[in-house]
Image: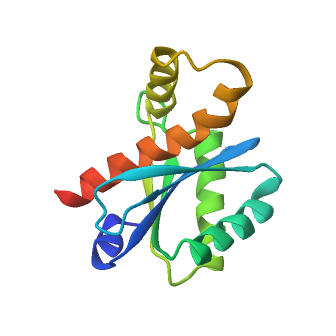
Amino acid sequence: MSFDKIKETKGRVLGIDFGEARTGLAVSDASRLLASGIGNIKGGGLERSVEAIAEVVATEKISAIVLGLPVNMNGTEGPRAARIRQFAAMLEERLPDVPLALMDERMTTMAASRFLNETNTRGQKRKGVIDTLSAEIILQNALDKLKR
């Protein structure tokens, strides 16, 4: 689960903001410069989410995955991080040829909320896009890290 394996691959990267209710998804362009949200998948447990993501990997021709890891502000990991690590292990088992890295997602939901406030996105529309926007931010942060 390191960025080194992702650096070794070429092609598009999938960014994931896993959630129990909704999982936001974003993909990079082939040159790995920009992240773009592609929507979300509805909750349904880890197994269902793994299968849905496997379908996205196939249809979008994804070569690597970056999964947001919820780290506490003090750098520790809590129960949500443990759940993400379990999800990551399941993804790696289901997609053994697709490298996966975990990306600290501290502040991404806050950044997404701030953006949605600035664009006056409210109500149901906000619920539908916040997870996708968070995945986009996670992925863009990872793409920027890969360039270094």
Q: Give the image's coloring scheme.
A: rainbow
Residue 124 is at least partly visible in this image: yes
Decide if residue 55 is on the left or right side of residue 81: right
Furthest residue toward bottom: 97
* Depicted 142 relative to depicted 32: above or below: above
Which residue is found at the position 20% from the left and 59% from the top? 147
- The picture places residue 61, in percent across and down from the top left corner, at 51, 76
Residue 73 x, y percent position in the rendering: 43, 27
- Image quadrant in which you'd find residue 89: bottom right
For image coordinates 33% across by 78% down, the residue present is: 9
Instruction: Give the quadrant of residue 58.
Output: bottom right
From this view, report whether residue 5 is shown above or below residue 19: below
Disc tally is 0
Tell me, yes or no, if residue 77 can be seen here: no
Q: Nearer the viewer, residue 140 or 91?
A: 140
Q: Residue 139 in the image: x percent, y percent?
A: 41, 51
Quadrant assignment for the N terminus: bottom left
Give coordinates of residue 68: x percent, y percent: 50, 48
The correct choice, above or below, for 62 with respect to 79 in the image is below
Q: Report the residue at 65% width, 72% height from top.
A: 54
Quarter in which the C terminus is drawn: bottom left
Extreme residue toward the right, this view:
44
**Is 46 placed left or right of 84 in the picture?**
right
Residue 60 located left or right of residue 28: right
The outermost residue toward the left is: 148
Depth order, front residue of 2/43: 43
